[in-house]
Image (spheres, rainbow, N blue to C red):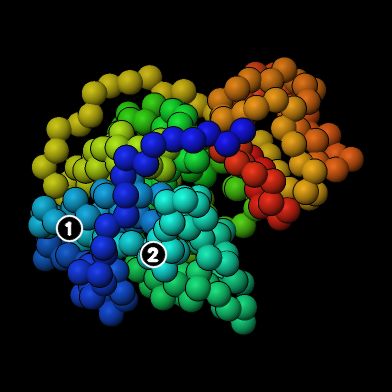
Amino acid sequence: MTTVLPIEVRPRDLSRYRAGNTGIDYVHRFESGRPGPHVLVNGLTHGNEFCGMVAVCELLDSGVRPKIGTLTLSFANVAAYETFDEARPFDSRLITHNLNRIWSAAQLDGSDDSVELRRAREMRPAVAAADHILDIHSTSQPVAPFWVYPAFERNAAVARALTRPAVHLVMPAGLGSGTPLIQHGGHAGEHGPGAALVVECGQHFMQASADLAVEVAKDFLGHFGLIDRSPPPAALPRRFELLRTHVIQHESFAFARPLIGFETFAEGELIATDGALEIRAPCDDCTIFMPAREAIVGREACT
Ligand SMILES: [Zn+2]
């Protein structure tokens, strides 16, 4: 199921963005001096998801400044990003922990240690301070871009208003496998301070993914009035609900057929086997998001 794809976007040297103005490496904050929301645009939660890096670089390089409120721009897992090896382009996603699963108070306040836990602890005040968060990601497989967000209306309203991408993956019961950045602190609850969304922009190394990330980041800032921006063209959303996240139990894990995402299954149809466990579709027209490229015990097989 490994797909060999051209690497169209390569990592850049981010050292010139290291010294931000917040006391946190790779975190930059711009205050308008006028009332308005505090918006955070973050890239590189996963080290090999270059589209977010391109979008944050584009905003910083263009000298973006908010007309109202406050803008924070950040690169999250630069340590993992810097381990990129073109021969093994999927390995630089993370070093020890998935930086998008460790945002619970229990983990952040706990005594475990890793590159990612240290980075999440460093970034915690920047994430906690934001009213609205756009966390930019990409996928292993070249599938249609999509939003991912907890099923709060405040999130859905923003994703609908932005119109692109048109596919929404809504999480009525959270992720089911850890706490993502967009569910840190106040954003976890019904009465959060604002919208917090992941955008999956397409395949990690495609130029189209980077191009979309730049547009979505600008749409997001325009939506909240931080920059002048015409609303994106109207589009009808396609909405999916996250029913289950499977964490791989056995090395023998295998999908029933090769999958990249968005394939559909009838209720009860076999999706995968994991040791003696059969994973069957919980509903008709069930689909899967983000199938794992290889079976790693303890990692998520698919969403
Ligand atoms: Zn990601």
How busy is the neighbourhood of tag 2: few (under 14 within 10 Å), some, or many (20 plus)? some
Is there any visible trace of residue 225 in the rendered image? yes
Seen at 56% across and 25% down, the residue is 262
Q: Position of residue 35 (x, y in %)?
A: 17, 60
Q: Earlier in the sequence, mark 1 or mark 2?
A: 1
The residue under the point 53% across, 34% down is 3
Residue at (27% x, 49% y) in the render: 54
Contact between labelled residues 2 and 1, with CB atoms less than 8 Å apart: no
Label 1 and label 2: CA atoms lie apart by: 19 Å
Q: Residue farthest to the front?
A: 87
The residue depicted at 37 percent of the width and 31 percent of the height is: 165
Mark 1 sits near ligand 1, with its Cβ under 8 Å away: no
| Residue 166 in the image, given as x and y percentages of width and height | 39, 26
Q: Amino acid at mark 2?
A: Glu
Q: Is residue 195 visible?
A: no
Task: Please identify the residue farthest to the right as the structure is shown.
Answer: 276
Dot 2 falls on a residue whose secondary structure is loop
Rendered-image quadrant of the N terminus:
top right
Q: Is residue 290 left or right of residue 205?
A: right
**Vertical placement of 128 versus 200: above or below?**
below
Amino acid type, label 1: Leu
Label 1 neighbour load within 10 Å: few <14, some 14-19, many 20+: some
What is the x, y in percent for residue 130? Answer: 34, 61
Q: Is residue 112 left or right of residue 115?
A: right
Quickly name the residue at label 1.
60
Image quarter of the C terminus: top right
The residue that mark 2 highlights is: 82
Q: Secondary structure at mark 1?
A: helix
> Percent x, y for residue 298?
71, 55
Q: How many marks on residues?
A: 2
Tell me the tag on residue 199: none
Tell me the mark number nearer the camera, choosing from 1 and 2: 2
